[in-house]
Image (spheres, rainbow, N blue to C red):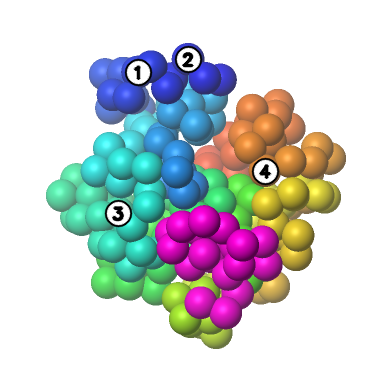
Amino acid sequence: MWEGARRPHPPERFRHGGLAPVVLVPGVLESWTMMRLIAERLNRAGHPVHVLPELRLNTAPLAEGAALVEEHLRAGDLRDAVIVAHSKGGLIAKLVLLGEEQERVARVIAIATPFAGSELARWMPTRTLRSLHPSDPSIRDLVARTEADARIVSIHPPFDPHIPGGSRLAGAENVPTAESGHFRILGSPEVLDAVEHLAGHDPVTGS
């Protein structure tokens, strides 16, 4: 899983595929390579996979991260895109669903995302991490805005040491996993199977 950390630039083959385009949004202090197994799986299935090196390690505020994703959607004129996100990336993806480029996105698949924040963030050493506390205005605003939740699939483990309150999202499609963890599930065969299925699932017709 960690091989991708030595290769920050995605392979050329990620550009190609006849299925819906996929945009990867990793979590805080992560690059896209943390989601490399997911990227490889979706690309083999036929999805072009887009990564955003400009997110760097995703330490910017949520609004700035969402703006980068929106710019990528516009620049590539992506349509019916599927955003696959991990942790904080799911918060950014929800913000995109509430923004000006929302019509370019068919659905969001969020893995272990703290939709209501994480109480543990209170004791984190940096402002970047503390901003994920439930009391942060950006988190409170996202919690209050539920109009896009039906377009989100939340894949959530039974126990996540980074999100004590869990990552279920009322109003979304919630997909529980058998395996616990926050990072480990990114390489779980169960999660890889679910993401591949959900990325190819039509959110309107259900086919």
**Location of residue 180 in the rendering, given as x and y in whole percent from the top left corner:** 79, 41
Is 31 colored magenta in this rendering?
Answer: no
User: Is residue 136 something one can see in this rendering?
Assistant: yes
Marks 1 and 3 close (CB-CB < 8 Å):
no
Which is nearer the N-term, disc 3 or disc 2? Answer: 2
Residue marked by disc 4: 182
Given the current orientation, which residue lies at the most extreme bottom position?
A: 144
Q: Earlier in the sequence, mark 4 or mark 2?
A: 2
Alpha carbon distance from label 4 to label 1 = 23 Å
Mark toward the viewer: 4 or 3:
4
Q: Quadrant of residue 104?
A: bottom left
Q: How many numbered circles are shown? A: 4
- Amino acid type for the residue under numbered disc 1: Arg
Q: CA distance from mark 4 to mark 2?
A: 19 Å
Q: Going 42% across and 22% down the picture, which residue do you hit?
A: 5
Q: What is the span of residues highlighted in magenta in the rendered image?
A: 117-136
Secondary-structure class at tag 2: helix
Residue 3 badge: 2
Question: Against 52, is 44 above or below?
Answer: above
**Front label number (3 vs 2):** 2
Q: Which residue is mark 3?
A: 69
Residue for badge 1: 7
Secondary structure under tag 1 reads loop
Instruction: Name the residue type under label 4.
Output: His
Q: Which mark is residue 99?
A: none
